[in-house]
Image (tube, rainbow, N blue to C red):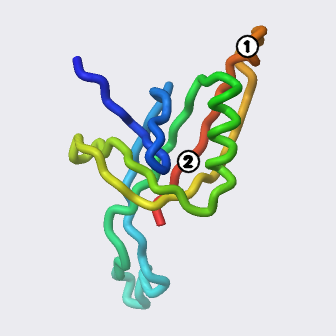
Amino acid sequence: MAFIQYLTFDGEDLPEPDSYEVSMDDVEADSSGQTEAGTTQRDVVRFGVHTISVSFSVTAKWMKKLTVYKQKSKIAVDFFDTETAAAVSAEMYISGYKVKREADSSYGGLWGVSFTLNEF
């Protein structure tokens, strides 16, 4: 089986994630909702905006790298799109960044890092 590169940030390949979930949502205008007559009106501004929830078990070196990416306002992301089973490029930002220690070692430990990538 061929190796799939799930995520690349600014041209740098990230390690294989422990979990990887892609969702696509539509962005609706404020005018969307229910009318006085009780019918639903949907004014879609953008279709298929990607959101990726991901978690990693990484070394301290990778934890520091991911923290630097978290602080950027915009990241060029290449990701594996589960709808098309192909690589897709998008500008994204990180939200919900969490780090927890998984194990301790003389090499700086093993760290659990999780976050959500949101497409602009």
Give the CA separation, mark 2 to mark 1. Answer: 27 Å
Pick out the residue farthest to the front. 11
Residue at left offset 45%, top offset 36%: 13
Residue 88 image point, x, y percent: 31, 51
Circle 1 is placed at which residue position? 107
Q: Looking at the picture, does residue 69 appear above or below residue 34? A: above
Task: Report helix, strand or loop for mark 2.
Answer: strand
Q: Earlier in the sequence, mark 2 or mark 1?
A: 1
Residue at left offset 37%, top offset 45%: 79
Residue 32 image point, x, y percent: 42, 81
Circle 2 is placed at which residue position? 116
Q: Looking at the picture, does residue 64 appear above or below residue 58? A: below
| Other residues around mark 1 within 10 Å, as few (<14) / some (14–19) / many (≥20) | few
* Left or right side of 96 for 40: left
Residue 90 image point, x, y percent: 39, 58
Q: Amino acid at mark 2?
A: Thr
Q: Amino acid at mark 1?
A: Tyr
Task: Report helix, strand or loop for mark 1.
Answer: loop
Residue at left offset 48%, top offset 50%: 10
Residue 7 image point, x, y percent: 43, 40
- The quadrant of the picture occupied by the N terminus is top left
